[in-house]
Amino acid sequence: MSNRTLGPRPASMAEPRFHLGLFVERFALVGAWLLTIIVFSIVLPGVFLTWGNFSVLFATQAPGAVLALALIIPLTAGDYDLSVGATLTLSAVIIGVLNAVLQWPVALAIPVSLAAGLAMGLINAFFIVYVRIPSLVVTLGSASVAAGLVQWISNSSTISGISPALIGVIGHRFLGISLVFYYVLALACIIWIVFEYTGLGRSILFVGRSREVARLSGLNVDWIRAACLVVSSLLAALGGVAYAGLLGAADPFSGLNYLLPAFAAAYLGATAILPGRFNALGALIAVYFLATGITGLTMLGIPIWVTSVFNGGALIVAVTVSQFARGREETDIV
Amino acid sequence: MEAVSSLARFDSQPAVTALAVRDLAKTFGGARALKGISFDIGPGEVHGLLGQNGCGKSTFVKILCGFHAPDPGGQISLYGEAVPLPMAAGSFRDLKLAFVHQQLGLVPSLTVLENLRVSHVTGRRGLINWKAERIAASQALGRFGIDLDLNARLDSLSQTQRALLAIVRASQDLADSQSEGDKGGILVLDEPTPFLPREGVQRLFGLVRQLVGQGASVLFISHDIDEVREITDRATVLRDGEVTARIETAHASHDDFIEGIVGRRIVRVTRPAAARATASVKAAVRDIAEPGLTVPALDIQEGEILGLTGLIGSGYERLPYLLFGADRARTGTLTFGGQVKSLRSMTPRQAVADGMALLPADRPKASGIGSLPIVDNLLMLDMRRFQTRLGLRRRAMVEEAGKLSTQYEVRPNKPSQKLSALSGGNAQKVLLAKWLLKRPGLLLLDEPTQGVDVGARQQLFRIVRQAATDGAAVICASSDFEQLAQLCDRVLIFARGAVAAELIGDEITKDHIAERCYVESDSRPQARIDG
């Protein structure tokens, strides 16, 4: 339980009167994103702020956005899932092997890769919820296992030649942006609605905030935790499908690079829109804020290692700022 | 008798008092928890400190360990030297004082060795010499004839072994804080025995006698009159923040102690159970036989508020959790709502579905989610009512929460605020309302007014009474006798894990409950009341 002397702080429902501090806290991340765009537009006149640049950015970050959205589900229920990056890669490589190598139709390859995601989720849930091993340990292990399987089935090399049908469904442009971006928007809206406007979403939040209270209130804590883990793996597998369609190939390694930015975005997003809670819109904004910064830095010709520094640094700085705004009380999220 | 021989030894000691307390007072807000108490402990003496809950015992201990600052004017001296008050937290280490609290302060997942040497190991600079630590630890245990595997994890030890370990550690800390040849030190044992089996208590007493033999003094704080009579030389009894009795143990009877604790001479009478209106039995408990708690048969009637109480360690507080399936029971059945349910297979989920409600004592951990808004805590069980095909009607939820907050007198009435922003009493109203929304047939309460201010207590009582009037059967486990007297129609007093007495109607007064608790915990058979 956090600080008892806490002042009034409406969480999900805005009180009728306008609250400046809260408004600033909720939209600081959006402001930071706009500021980043403005700064790079000035530094890189005519190159950075173009429709082409941003439509590419919106599309290429889609798999990372799916991962961030997948992550906030078990995080809200109080469990980590470090295996989403590996599950994404596994799913993409399964599509590559089945479709490009074995010449299966995409319509058959996709269910198989989703089934692999489902299996990952069930395995994680079994060890975390039934055997009662900390989620950090289980998903760290299962991530490594999945990464190994990926190298085995892909022979550690990129598989190209994925069916144009999939590429069309993912990469076809609508209003200049690949369809995958709209899928991500839809997913974020669904997760937002489930979390904010359904009893199920509230139950997940209760389980994450206090397992004991949830249990004594008659919630089926174990099932809820397990379901959240399974859904996050399934979404990660969907992210893999998007990744394969976007690239037209299955890369056995670079998908893993989405994991840290996705975690960063989940935590960064929890400082915005609904401060103190993992939330879909915040996570989505955070993904694109981080990606915008990195794109700009890359266009300035800054070496690749700066990417990692930027991702990690932005996370710590943003969370620190929000902590000071809250008077350094204990955070509600872990 | 042991008490007599140690008293003789005490008389032969030079008359420098180990601990002298003079006019020590403590006021919280307007309430005087301690109204100026004075007493002495001699060197080599085992001194008992007794009293009911709220008598000021724990306030005194907290002053002694530097947690509370006493009101100006009081004095504490150790071995003739006045202690500067308020004491800095933790400064007792330098003052020849050591504490063993009821929770013992041991880390369950670490080894005996690590637990025993923790203050040594963490305090030192440079590398730890584990070999030397090991030798020191086995010497310390050996000196008291305690045989323990130094590598054993603490959670593999019995309660008795843990208690002994905690005391050995405290005595070592005492020895460490002293210069050569200086053999005093005061060990404060704060309720170390309630969860120990009989033979465990004997071993603990053996250890206390050894310590006293080496020159230490012991302040033994307990509810248990028999134990105090067995181990102490003298005792001080507190009631309502004042010293009500100073007792030379050897010359005092069990009833002398009770008189000091309860405030009047007890009269041993047996009253016939008053004929009760035979309302319908709402819930019936049968055949619970758990380790430390036996309830062969217990019926609760519709509209009845049944209190459960006893001294610490008597086991009464476990019953609500067993009935609700919150703690796993191996035996017993509950007949409720026309069905006989085995408690073995009871789960909270099942209990909620059957129309039971449990308000646990541990508000921050088990009862409310402080980091979530009041509206979510309040309507947690009732969200289905606000679910439409288009999702939860959040605005309607907030409005409903506002109405309920008014009805249950929650102040301030701001449903969007976090639960942790409310005072204890108001948070408790929210959590009670959460359960009452489901109109439970069986309402289980554990310490419902713990940490609740006086005004809110009365409001909570009204709410509980209303629930009973509406037809619920209420079970209220509480160590607060005044609360039981105000709230309950019937009170069961537990001793040693079983119902020992039943009070009905006019018999239920604060003093009467206290008296029965102490009488029933008396192990002498002749003190038992027939019937």
Image (cartoon, helix red, strand yellow):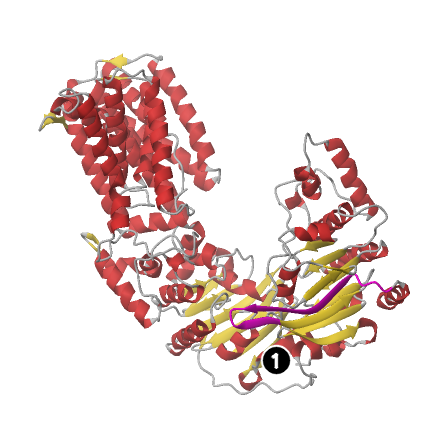
Residue B512: x %, y % from top left: 61, 81
Q: Which residues are magenta?
A: B15-34
Residue B518 appearing in the image = yes
Residue B104: x %, y % from top left: 65, 52
Q: Is residue B126 above or below residue B100?
A: above
Pointer 1 indicates a residue of which chain? B
Residue A209: x %, y % from top left: 40, 49
Q: Residue furthest left?
A: A175
Regarding mark 1 in the picture, which secondary structure is present there? helix
Res. B227 image quadrant: bottom right
Identify residue for label 1.
B511
Question: Residue drawn 46% across and 56% down?
Answer: B364
Q: Is residue A112 above or below residue B34?
A: above
Looking at the image, residue B179 sits to the left or right of residue A50; the answer is right
Q: Is residue B61 above or below residue A125?
A: below
Secondary structure that dominates the magenta span: strand
Q: Is residue A3 above or below residue B219?
A: above
Residue A45: x %, y % from top left: 15, 21
For the C terminus of chain B, the quadrant is: bottom right
